[in-house]
Amino acid sequence: MDEMENRLPQQEPEHNEEAAEEITAVTGEEAAPAEQPAVESATARIPEEQHVPQPVPPVQRPGRRSPYENSPYMMPYQRPVQAPPVPPVQTPAPQQEEPAPEKPHKVKKGKIWLLTLALIGAVLFMNFLTARWGADMAEDRASARIGLLQAQIADLQEQLDVMQNTGDSVSGTPNTGVDGGLTPGQVFARNEKSVVLIETEMSTGTGFILTEDGYVVTNYHVLEDGQQISVVLHDRSYHPATLVGYEANNDVALLKMEGDGFTAVTLGSSDALVVGDQVAAIGNPLGELTSTLTVGFVSAKERNVSTDSSVINMIQTDCAINSGNSGGPLFNMKGEVVGITTAKYSGMSATGASIEGIGFAIPIDDVRGILDDLMEFGYVKSAYLGVSVYTLEPSPEYPLGCLVDSVVPGGCADKAGILPGDIIIGLAGFDIDGYTDLGRALREFEGGETTTITVYREGTGNVTMDITLDAKPREDAPQESEKPMPENGSYEEWYEYFFGE
C-alpha cells in the first residue's frame, strides 16, 4: 500500500471534499467513513465463537483521489464478504459389530473314542512313569543301604583284624588260638553241653554227642566190660544208651540215646593240625571231676601207640589226660573236634625218670569213615587186610610205609604172600606213608574185591602182588544186661546184680 501510495500523484487536500461529494451523488447514499460499514457487516456475519480476522482494506487518506475514479471501467468497490467457516463435522467412530454366536460343532463319535483312548493312554503312561520313578527311587535307597551295610561290615572286619594282630579276643582277653580263633574259655562255653559222662557197672569215661538225635562217640575200652550203659548230660540228667557198634582195632564205639534236640559238636580236621597248635580237652577225670578243661599243645603227630589189641596212629599232646578222660573230645581253637582222647603215659620210665605231660588222642580223620559205617550199618563195612601194622619213623635205610608186625593166618594177606617184616608202600595206586593212609585206602573197597598191593622186602626190594580183600569181620557187641541196675537196693540186691548166678 505504501508503494502504491508513493506511485500515485500527490493530490492537493482541497480536492478531497469534491471527491466525497461525487461518490455520494453516484451511490445516492451519504458517504460514511470508509471502514465502518464493511467492518460491521462482516462482523455481523461471523459467529462470535469462531471470529476469523479479515484483511483490512487500504485506508483512503483524505485529500487524495484516484486518477481512475471517473474511468468507465471503474466498478463500485465492495469489500468481499467471507463466509463464516463451517465447523468440522465430526464423523462418529465405526461401531464394532458383535460377532454372531457360533453354532456348536457336532463331534463325531469316532473322534470321541479317539480322544478317550488318548486320554486313557496318557493316564497309563503317566502311571508307568510314576511307577518307574518310584522303582528307581527304591533302587537308589536300597543301593544306599547296601553301601552303608558294606561300610559297617568293613569297619567290623577292620576291628577283628586289629584284635587278631594284637592277640585280643572279642571279650578282650588274650587270645592264643590258631589264626585268631577262640580262647580256651570260649571253646569250653561253646562245647560244655556236648560233652557227657559215660557210666557202666564196671567203669566210667567220657564221650561227646555226635548228632542232635542222640548218637554218642566214646572209646571202646570204656564199654568193653560193661553190660548196661548210661549217659549223663551236663545238667546231671541220666539217659540209658544202647551200643550201636564198635571197632576194637581203632578203639572207637558208637552209642545211641533216645530223644532229640541234643547239643552236638562240630567235627574239624586232624590233618590240618601242626605241631605247636593249641588244643583243649574236656572230660571227666576220675569219673568225678565232671566238665574239666585242660589246655595244651600238639606235641607230635603220627605216633604209633600200642594198645591191648593193635597199634594205633595217634596225636601226642601235653594236655592233662587222666583216667576218666578216655573217649572225650580234643578241640582245636575253633571249637572243632580234632581227636578222641584215649591214653597217656604215666609212672616211671625204664631208667626211673618220671613221665609227665604225654597224652594221646585218635585223629578224627582216621575214624570218620568208621563212624559213618557204624551209624549206617552197625559195623565197619570196609575191606579187611588181615595184618597188624604200625607206621615207620622216617629213616634213610627204609622207605616210608606201614611195617607189618603180624599176619592173620588164612587171611587175604597171608594168601597173597605178605610176610611179617614187609613194609606196605602202596595199595591199588594209593601211596602208603603210614597207618592213616592204609586205613583210608582200605575204606575205598569192600570185601571180595581184587586189587594190587606193593611191599618193600629187605634183600629183595619192591614186590607187587595181587590180593583179594576180605570183608571185615563183625565184632559182637556186649549184650545189655537183662536185670536193671538197682537205684536204692539193699546189699543183697547189689551183690546179686554184680555177682548173681
Image (tube, helix red, strand yellow):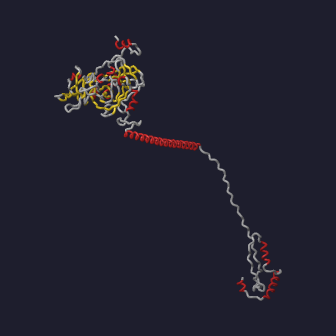
Residue 287 placed where, x, y %?
Answer: 36, 22
Is residue 16 among the parts visible in the rendering?
A: yes
Determine whether 78 is above or below 499 in the image.
Answer: below
Q: Nearer the viewer, residue 296 or 354?
A: 354
Q: Position of residue 146 (x, y in %)?
A: 45, 41
Of residues 375 and 323, the one nearer the viewer is 323
- In the image, residue 236 sits, relative to residue 277, either above or below, namely above
Q: How many marks?
A: 0
Q: Quadrant of the N terminus?
A: bottom right
Which image quarter holds the C terminus? top left
Image quarter of residue 198? top left
Image position of 36 with respect to 227: above or below: below
Q: Name the residue nearer the viewer: 39 or 167.
A: 167
In the image: residue 134, left or right of residue 453: right
Q: Position of residue 332 (x, y in %)?
A: 35, 32
Q: Residue at the front extreme?
A: 352
Q: Quadrant of residue 8?
A: bottom right
Of all residues shown, which one is farthest toward the left? 459
Q: Is residue 150 left or right of residue 251?
A: right
